[in-house]
Image (tube, helix red, strand yellow):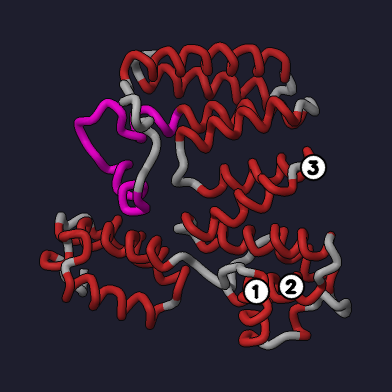
């Protein structure tokens, strides 16, 4: 387990067992790998008593931590194979009906990779299946604080829309779907919800954008991305640009644009350049 490639190869073997329908063998292999992973982490990823290494105090640290080099705790070397391991284990346990085991496995995936909101949304679905509405709503809400991808925002709005439909809050469900649709991202879950509510009291066409935002404000829900996350994306983009990593700078800027729109991104880039947010503004080339 000391080499990433070894774990990756064994994960590929486990995924092959899953694809072949050998669920029991896959679980046996993945659980062994999980035990080995935790032992490896204990040896190589020493944590202080005050803070676990996989905790990220600020959004900026969550985004930048993946790019630290020369650190044995860096997520590309440790976290990413481990989150894949636990996600695979959760998948096969769900297929076998072990929702409690799958829930615990996905909790570990979130632990190893708290940046990727897909794990949070999958875990929320398991809590919904298990009837734990508080965890379902809490994890869904946390996506708005962490999402750096518009598809995750769309899925979070869908989660809340389903909750409001289940509880008879049709106007709130319509508002969530209106905000999700406005993000203009193709999503099968959203399409399914929109088709089912058409012509009902949960139809988003009954509200304007302003009315939808007002309804969600009354519910205490955000209507879009956390601006701090967008600033972090753009700050990382400025760092990448200053290091002439044009591909990463472009990718991060596009993700920020998708979350809040081009005008807001332009304004934030100007702010970063003028105020030297996170220490990178002075080196940023706006045309990079």
Q: Which residue is mark 1?
A: 216
Quarter of the figure with residue 20: top right
Quarter of the figure with residue 75: top left
Q: Is residue 38 above or below residue 104?
A: above
C-alpha distance separating marks 3 and 1 = 24 Å
Quarter of the figure that contains the C terminus: bottom left
**How many dots with numbers?**
3
Q: Position of residue 42 (x, y in %)?
A: 38, 16
User: Label 1 near label 2: C-beta < 8 Å?
Assistant: yes
The residue nearer to you, when weighing 117 against 217, is 217
Q: Residue furthest left?
A: 282
Q: Residue at x 35, y 45 (%)?
A: 57
Whether 64 is among the magenta residues is yes
Q: Is residue 91 left or right of residue 143?
A: right
Under tag 1, what secondary structure? helix
Q: Which residue is mark 2?
A: 172
Under tag 2, what secondary structure? helix
Which is more N-terminal, label 1 or label 2? 2
The span shown in magenta is: 58-81
C-alpha distance separating marks 2 and 1 = 6 Å
Which is more N-terminal, label 1 or label 3? 3
Q: Which residue is mark 3?
A: 131
Q: Position of residue 84 (x, y in %)?
A: 52, 31
Q: Residue furthest right?
A: 200
Q: Residue at x 58, y 34 (%)?
A: 107
Under tag 3, what secondary structure? loop
């Amino acid at each position: 387990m000391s080499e990433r490639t070894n774990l990756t190869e064994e994960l590929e073997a486990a995924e092959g067992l899953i694809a072949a329908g050998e669920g029991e063998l896959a679980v046996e292999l993945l659980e062994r790998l999980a035990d080995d992973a935790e032992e490896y982490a204990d040896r190589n990823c020493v944590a202080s008593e005050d803070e676990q290494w996989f905790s990220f105090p600020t959004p900026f640290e969550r985004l930048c931590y993946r790019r630290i080099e020369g650190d044995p705790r860096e997520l590309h070397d440790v976290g990413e194979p481990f989150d894949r391991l636990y996600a695979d284990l959760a998948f096969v346990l769900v297929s076998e009906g072990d929702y409690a085991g799958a829930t615990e496995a996905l909790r570990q995936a979130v632990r190893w990779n708290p940046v990727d909101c897909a794990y949070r949304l999958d875990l929320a679905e398991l809590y919904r299946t298990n009837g734990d509405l508080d965890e379902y709503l809490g994890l869904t809400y946390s996506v708005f604080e962490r999402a750096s991808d518009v598809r995750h925002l769309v899925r979070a709005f869908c989660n809340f829309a389903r909750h409001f439909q289940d509880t008879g809050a049709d106007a709130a469900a319509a508002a969530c779907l209106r905000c999700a649709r406005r993000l203009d991202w193709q999503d099968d879950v959203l399409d399914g919800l929109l088709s089912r509510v058409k012509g009902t009291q949960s139809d988003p066409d009954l509200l304007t954008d302003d009315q939808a935002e007002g309804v969600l404000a009354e519910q205490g829900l955000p209507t879009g991305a956390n601006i701090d996350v967008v600033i972090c994306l753009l700050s990382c983009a400025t760092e990448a640009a200053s290091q002439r990593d044009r591909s990463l700078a472009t990718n991060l800027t596009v993700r920020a644009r998708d979350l809040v729109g081009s005008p807001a991104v332009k304004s934030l880039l100007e702010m970063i350049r003028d105020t030297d947010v996170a220490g990178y503004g002075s080196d940023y080339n706006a045309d990079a």
